[in-house]
Amino acid sequence: MSPTILRVGEYRFFFNSREEPRMHVHIATADGTAKFWLEPIIALADYHNLRSKDLRKIEKLVREYEHEFQKAWQRHFGQ
């Protein structure tokens, strides 16, 4: 199960239900994917087929919605 947490333009932010316990968010676009850690600091964990420009936009959105992602993570994973 991969619940969608947020959609902003072409970006879909979601979690994978059965994955590592470190808090993070996945992002999907028509062109590729990315994964950002939410702890201990926001950092790019992985990406596929995205340009630097896209990654900067996504990181800005992750920072903007950081608290919402953290709350959604806690609700979803029961922490």
Image (spheres, helix red, strand yellow):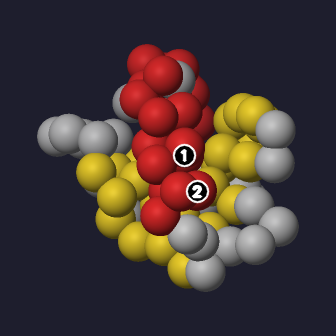
Establish if 4 lies above or below 1.
above
- Residue tagged by mark 2? 54
- Which of labels 2 and 1 is toward the front? 2
Residue located at (52% from left, 23% from top) = 65
- Location of the N terminus (image quadrant): bottom right
Q: Position of residue 19 (x, y in %)?
A: 47, 66
> In this orientation, does residue 77 appear?
no
Which amino acid, mark 1?
Answer: Ile
Residue located at (58% from left, 56% from top) = 54
Which numbered tag is attached to residue 67? Answer: none
For the residue pair 25 and 62, the one nearer the viewer reads as 62
The Cα–Cα distance between marks 2 and 1, rounded to whole angstroms, is: 6 Å
Residue located at (55% from left, 79% from top) = 48
Answer yes or no: do the residues labelled 2 and 1 have beta carbons within 8 Å?
yes
Establish if 41 lies above or below 44.
above
Q: Position of residue 18 (x, y in %)?
A: 54, 65
- Residue tagged by mark 1? 58
Judged left or right of residue 9, residue 46 is left
For the residue pair 10 and 20, the one nearer the viewer reads as 10
Label 2 sits on a secondary structure element that is helix
Q: Position of residue 29 (x, y in %)?
A: 75, 61
Establish if 26 lies above or below 42.
below
